[in-house]
Image (spheres, rainbow, N blue to C red):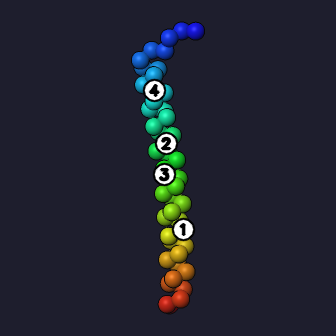
C-alpha cells in the first residue's frame, strides 16, 4: 500500500467538507420549503 500524497489527503478532506455543506443545503432547503408551506396556510386563513 502506498502512502497518500498531501494532495490526495487534502482532496479527500475537501470532498468531505463539500459533502457536509451539501447535506446542510438540503436541510436548509427543507426548512425553507416547510416555512413557505406554513406561510401559505396562514395566508389562506386571512385572505
At horizontal 52% and vertical 78% (from top left) the residue drawn is 40
Measured in 3D between alpha carbons, the distance from the residue under mark 2 to the one under mark 1, in whole angstroms, is: 21 Å
Q: Quadrant of residue 1?
A: top right
Measured in 3D between alpha carbons, the distance from the residue under mark 4 to the one under mark 1, in whole angstroms, is: 35 Å
Q: Secondary structure at mark 1?
A: helix
The mark closer to the camera, 2 or 4, is 2
- Which residue is labeled 3 in the image? 25
- Which residue is labeled 4 in the image? 11
Determine whether label 2 and label 1 are within 8 Å by CB. no
- Which residue is labeled 2 in the image? 20
Q: Earlier in the sequence, mark 3 or mark 4?
A: 4
Q: Earlier in the sequence, mark 1 or mark 3?
A: 3
Measured in 3D between alpha carbons, the distance from the residue under mark 2 to the one under mark 4, in whole angstroms, is: 14 Å
Q: Judge by depth and name the residue closer to the eye, 37 or 2.
A: 2
At horizontal 52% and vertical 47% (from top left) the residue drawn is 23
Q: Secondary structure at mark 3?
A: helix
Measured in 3D between alpha carbons, the distance from the residue under mark 3 to the one under mark 4, in whole angstroms, is: 21 Å
- Which residue is labeled 1 in the image? 34
Q: How crowded is the residue under tag 4: few (<14 C-alpha within 10 Å), some, or many (20+)? A: few
Q: How crowded is the residue under tag 2: few (<14 C-alpha within 10 Å), some, or many (20+)? A: few
Measured in 3D between alpha carbons, the distance from the residue under mark 1 to the one under mark 3, in whole angstroms, is: 14 Å
Amino acid at each position: 500500500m502506498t502512502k497518500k500524497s498531501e494532495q490526495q489527503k487534502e482532496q479527500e478532506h475537501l470532498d468531505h467538507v463539500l459533502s457536509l455543506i451539501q447535506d446542510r443545503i438540503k436541510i436548509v432547503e427543507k426548512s425553507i420549503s416547510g416555512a413557505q408551506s406554513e406561510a401559505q396556510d396562514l395566508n389562506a386563513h386571512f385572505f
